[in-house]
Structure formats: structure tokens, C-alpha cells
Amino acid sequence: METVFVNLKDINGDINIKYTGIYDEKISKIMFLFWQIQEQNEIFVAGIVFEMKEKNIVYISILDSTGEFKPRNMQKGFINGIILALLKYLSPTFLEVFSQPKKEIIFGKSSKNTKKGFLNSHKLFKYWKNIFSEYICCENKKEYKLYIHNNTDECNGIPYHRNTKLNDIYLFDDDPKQKLINNLEENVDIYNFFSVLLFRSDFSNGSLLFNVCPCKKHNSNINLEEFNLFDIKEILETLRGLDFSDYQNSLKSTIFFLKKYQLKSFLFKTSKSKLSENIIETPIEEQSFVKIKTKSKK
């Protein structure tokens, strides 16, 4: 797999990260798992799942971490970097996420890990708003529009025209729209539908965010043939059944998982760029990334 990733450099030395990409054709989802090499030990640090509709329609389905990334004060910068790098790699013209806090969603018992951070609904919304505002993959930056749909004053509309029919909007597996639409008539006005959506319990602490570029000229770098072809639901079930409650258990769980699945993995190297613990406030330029291609793990 050849892709584009952020480079990392700790002041005390290199940060060595390996990753694997998994594609599940049945449900049109892509999963990335990241683990760090710490003193010759491999330990999971993060995972993310995307659902895709067509080539450039992307929904961020799941994001989770274990709390075991080192140094700890650079974890947020690392997570921000991989999200933005993956978005640049997938290059969506329509990007969506449902922001709702969950203490663990990939790594079993990781919520018990005292090193794992947890964002409340307000901070998580701000986190995704910053990420979505940051993602720009088109030369014409003015083309982008950020839509927010929630029960706050920041709600600013939806990425659909009033005459759009319900069966023409994008729906995803873990999407609150999907859960509501099955109980409504097809002729419901699109604006009324989104208004009703705000009364769902999901939206007491949840927000829908959309990043839309109408140019529809993005060139995705994705090549699905380079991914591991596997059942993502099984992968998630396995990871959720393991123990990431502390360092030792995370090590054991990582070893067990990697030995069980033998997924081809890749290494992305480091450069002199340093990540801070703060959200990146300016767009990541091309020179902030490097293309790395390595031999698959055997």
C-alpha cells in the first residue's frame, strides 16, 4: 500500500508507527489500525473506520484510541495528523461525521485506561469542527462549505436543497438519519426530516457535521487492491473482546491480534516535524507529508 502520512519526530528520538488497512467490500468500509513500536514492543494506539458511498462520499464511522501513544502529550497531535492525512488520501468531496462521545468503541476495556483521554460532547464537537474546517483538498478553498446540524446556536443548515427527496440523501450504517428514515414516509419534506432528527435522543449530545466541496474534481489516491480484504465486523468484535485497560494488557492484546490475523502492515517513518498537543490550526501542506512504501509484514 502506498499512501500519504504525516511524519512524526519526538525530541528524544524517532516515533515509529506501523499501520494496516482493511477493506470490507460487503459493507463498503475501510479500517485503519495503528500501532507504535515502543522499546521493540508493538502496541495498538489508534483505529479509525470510514464508510464510503461511491468514490468521494465518505462517512467517518468510528474513531478510537488506547491511550498508549508515547509521548502522551503528543497523542492529540498524532491523532489529528493521521485523520487529516487519511482524509487527504481518500479525498472526499462529501464528508460527514456524527459527533457523539463514546468512551470506547474499538478497543475493549480501554475506557478503564487512566491514560486515555475522553472528550465531552462540547469538546468533541469542537474537535470535529476543527478537523472538518482544516480538511481542504481542492485548490479553490472558497469552494468548501462546512454544515453543522445540532441543537446549538452553531446549527447553520444542511448540505441538501429543499426539493431533495429522502431517498436521495446519503445514509450510512452508524448514521442517526438511517435510524429515523425507516419510520417516516418518503414524501416528508427534507427540512422537516432534519428538524425531526434533532428531537432524537442522539442529539441531546450529538452533532452532524458535513464538509462539502461542489467542484467534485478530487482525485482519490485509494487503491483497494492494496488493502487486506477482511470482515471488519469480525475485526471489531475481536478487538472489543480484548483487554486494553492498561499497558501490559494492551501489549498482550496487540500481540494476540497481530498473530491471529497476520495482516500485511506498513511502516511510516519520521521527519523533523514535531507535533504539539494542540489542534493543528493551519492547513497541512504537501511538504508535511511523505509517501512511504514498505514490504508487507509476513
Image (tube, rainbow, N blue to C red):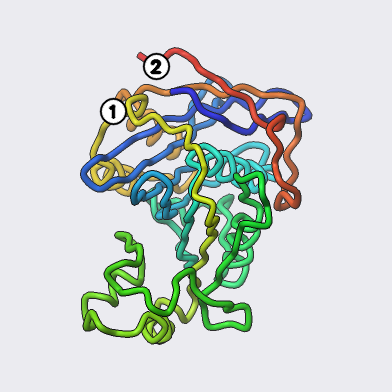
Q: Which residue is mark 1?
A: 261
Residue closer to the observer: 59 or 77: 59
Q: Is residue 32 above or below residue 209?
A: above
Quadrant assignment for the C terminus: top left
Q: Residue at x 28, y 42 (%)?
A: 232
Q: Position of residue 137 (x, y in %)?
A: 60, 44
Left or right: residue 257 versus residue 138 is left
Q: Is residue 189 left or right of residue 289?
A: left
The amino acid type found where label 1 is placed reads Tyr
Look at label 2 and name its amino acid: Lys
| Closer to us: 32 or 104 | 32
Q: Residue at x 39, y 32 (%)?
A: 21
Q: Is residue 158 above or below residue 246?
A: below
Label annotation for residue 297: 2
Q: How many marks?
A: 2
Q: Residues within 10 Å of mark 1 (few under 14, many from 20)?
A: few
Name the spot of residue 128 as percent of width and height, x first: 58, 60
Tell me where residue 227 appears, x and y as whole percent.
Answer: 35, 29
Residue 292, how many percent across, how many down?
Answer: 56, 20
